[in-house]
Image (cartoon, grey):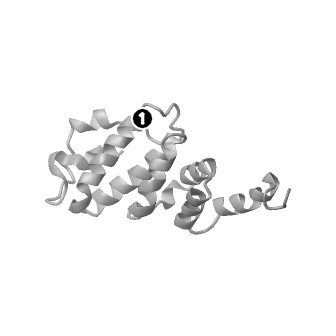
Amino acid sequence: MSAISHPSALICPLEHALHFQNFPIALDFFHQWPAHRQAADLVVARHGEINGNLYYLLDPAARWLEGTHPLAATLLRRAMIEDTLDGAKSTRYRHAARHLAECQAMALLINDYGRFEAHGVSSHVSAPNTAGNRASDPPGGCRSLVL
């Protein structure tokens, strides 16, 4: 067995990627490897570094993770939703609505949210956020739907 194909030889690059300074590159590395568990660990451990504007990376990664790591997939989708609403990116509202529906579906698969807030779509849908609405916000105060 060659050194690179031995399982212990893989620990170093995977561990290095978990701590790699650039979050998007690390996530892409795990996605391309593929290493589901490590990608999910990265997302959960460094969720504050997720740039929701990187939809071209986050959307496929969320779809890839949703079957095995629904919490990580939800965190990626939340970042995209928040970026869309915070930036009043009206051309992305339909994608944000889809991501919201996907988060709601994933909620049934998540037993433990750990330190993250549970996905409470149903409690937010009927209570529009009138305090911070802007003309560019989606109709019905959907800004309040973001977790």
- The image quarter in which residue 87 lies: bottom left
User: Dot 1 surroundings within 10 Å: few (below 14), some, or many (20 or more)?
Assistant: some
- As drawn, 93 above or below 22: above
Q: Nearer the viewer, residue 33 or 82?
A: 33
Q: Residue placed at 80% from the left, 58% from the top?
A: 9
Q: Label 1, on which residue?
A: 107
User: Quadrant of the image for the C terminus?
Assistant: top left
- As drawn, 70 above or below 51: above
Q: Residue placed at 48% from the left, 54% from the top?
A: 61
Whole-percent x and y of residue 22?
56, 68
Q: Nearer the viewer, residue 105 or 85?
A: 105
Q: Residue placed at 21% from the left, 54% from the top?
A: 132
Q: Residue placed at 44% from the left, 57% from the top?
A: 58
Left/right of residue 136 with respect to residue 87 in the rendered view:
left
Please say whether residue 146 is visible from this viewpoint.
no
User: Quadrant of the image for the N terminus?
Assistant: bottom right
Q: Nearer the viewer, residue 145 or 22?
A: 22
What's the residue type where badge 1 is placed? Ala
Whole-percent x and y of residue 127?
21, 38
Left/right of residue 127 with respect to residue 114 in the rendered view:
left
- As drawn, 112 above or below 139: above
